[in-house]
Image (cartoon, rainbow, N blue to C red):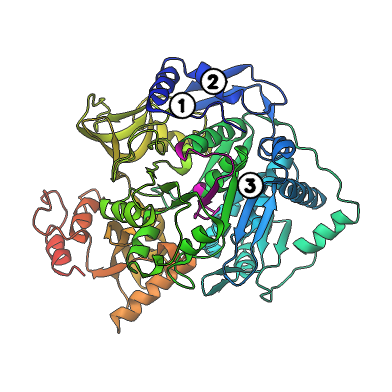
Amino acid sequence: MSYPYQIHTPEEYHAAYRKSVNDPEAFWADIAANFYWRKRWDRVLDWNFTEPSIKWFSGAKLNITENCLDRHLGSLGNKPAIIWEPNDPEEHHRVITYRDLHAKVVQFANVLKNNGVKKGDRVCIYMGMVPELAIAVLACARIGAVHSVIFGGFSAQSIADRLQDAMATFIITCDGAFRGNKEIPLKSVIDDALVQCRFVKRVIVLTRTRTPVSMIKGRDVWWEDEIKKVETHGNPDCPAEEMDAEDELFILYTSGSTGKPKGVVHTCAGYMVYTTYSFVNVFQYHPGDIHFCTADIGWITGHSYIVYGPLGAGATTLMFEGVPTWPDAGRFWDIVDKYRVNILYTAPTAIRSLMSFGLGPIQDKDLSSLKVLGTVGEPINEEAWNWYHEYIGKNKCPIVDTWWQTETGGILISNMAGVTPGKASFATLPLPGVQPMLVDENGEELKGNGVSGNLCIRYPWPGIIRTTYGDHERCRLNYFATYPNLYFTGDGCLRDENGNYRITGRVDDVLNVSGHRIGTAEVENAINMHAGVVESAVVGYPHDLKGQGIYAYVIYSGTHGDENLTRQDITLTVSRIIGPIAKPDKIQFVTGLPKTRSGKIMRRILRKIAEGETENLGDTTTLLDPHVVVEIRDGKI
């Protein structure tokens, strides 16, 4: 099997890029022609960024699972689709062929139908990294239900917020999940969330950890029991539901600059075409390669580059249940060695963490199968890039430093492995079809090279966000209103003298902690729910492992007693409300916050103090009480 749209040389890249800019519709029509369509499109693209309204492949009919599964059965039926490595290295791994995966997806799609799930229903999936998570995602897509996967580290309150926003009436979960030496009681967390969500009709529970769970008659059913019911009818087929190109495929919640998470909506056709195209080209995938993306399917990286992109390309994708440091810091390298992994795609946070263990865990591990290394989630610093290149890639594997977002659906800016040049700490060049531009604060374009500004995209690509679920105005305000007729990424960016792009970080109130986007307002809301807290302000600061840490300034009215105990109480509150990923790394108690006379908190000043800048704090004369700044500066942790 070959990919007619795969780029092999720098010349092919530049030719494809020129065509994608000069005639985008013809360019994407040629790519889309390589997929299976029940009915071809009437128009390639209708769009305006003002409303915004974006429609790719209007009039086309398809089902994404026919492209990820059915069309591969003839040529790839006996090839591995998913290799699953369990948390415990002593437990037996699983290899699921395309034929097996197709059968399991059809089977579970019938389970969903038997339990009343219909086209357009929202299904919340809250599971550990087991193959059944991918099966559940694909089964939803097969019958036209809209899946919304929630990362297994989120709290009951975070789940309830998402269930209520999506009005998801069906849930798929596990009794528990294994992560390193921990057991996470997933069903118990769901039960806590459902106290606020009486509208949920059915909870399907997979057995994984054998943790005792509460099963409510009429609402909760076991995955295994439901499978047996399908099997008693001889495992009937489940023909894929015919979907319109712009029907919703999934909702994925991401933190915004306000406290409420926003549900990013992706649709069937454009997302399918873009994730598969970007997967094949960025990673230079070749049939038979083993692709290991270490992300969780609860994040967009797992959706696009564990499930849909690789399966759309007929690839072999490796899923890992555990964590990189358990039972020791050699776990990733054991997996690479065991399965002869060819492509490793992970986060800079993981690389920095593994660097801290020295070279011991790499010794005696055969990493010679690796051909491509990748990073995702945040810009990779030069020191980590060099370590990854030298010790993991043995100076022979190109590193693709991929920049993209939940909202973009797939990778927008990255070198293509071994085709276009990489550069440490730079995402480098846009993919064909992606037209980036830098603007100043007034929206004026910054032309030429050697400039820095805010990163925008001037033209739609097939994987672009269509709306935020149930609130289109929020989508417009967040992404399309800041700079008219442009998609605003929220990131600052530098373009070097050769036209390479380097992401310099968020320009809004969103933190990037270990590759997870967390809104400052969301963390502040959680801190403020602690009984003794009057007010708080949260900023990011440089963190050796996480990239960005969370620094909280807290006004506390209660009796402190032991300050450290109070800090632990506040941290626990945040964990309960959002999840452990949002815990503040530092909490400084203050008597006031730097505010303008209109009441706006000057986070710019707080950020500088958290970063260790104590002298050049800028103009403080507009503050209501400039003396507060001195107190905060002198009390820095």
According to the picture, the residue beneath numbered tag 3 turns out to be 147
Q: Is residue 290 magenta?
A: yes
Q: Residue at x 63, y 49 (%)?
A: 167
- Report the amino acid beneath label 1: Pro
- Report the amino acid beneath label 2: Leu
Total label count?
3
Return the x and y of residue 366 as percentages of the image width and height: 46, 60
Image side of residue 175 versus residue 238, left or right: left
According to the picture, the residue beneath numbered tag 2 turns out to be 45
Image side of residue 238 versus residue 12, left or right: right
Return the x and y of residue 319 as percentages of the image width and height: 57, 56
Which quadrant of the rendered structure holds the N terminus?
top right
Q: Quadrant of residue 550?
A: bottom left
According to the picture, the residue beneath numbered tag 1 turns out to be 460
Q: Which residues lie in the magenta part?
A: 282-301
Q: Quadrant of residue 251?
A: top right
Vertical comparison of 292 with 590: above or below: above
Main SS, magenta region, reads loop
Q: Give the Cα separation between the discs numbered 1 and 3.
A: 24 Å
Is the residue marked by circle 3 packed among few (<14), some (14-19), or many (20+) residues within 10 Å?
many
Q: Secondary structure at mark 3?
A: strand
- Report the amino acid beneath label 3: His
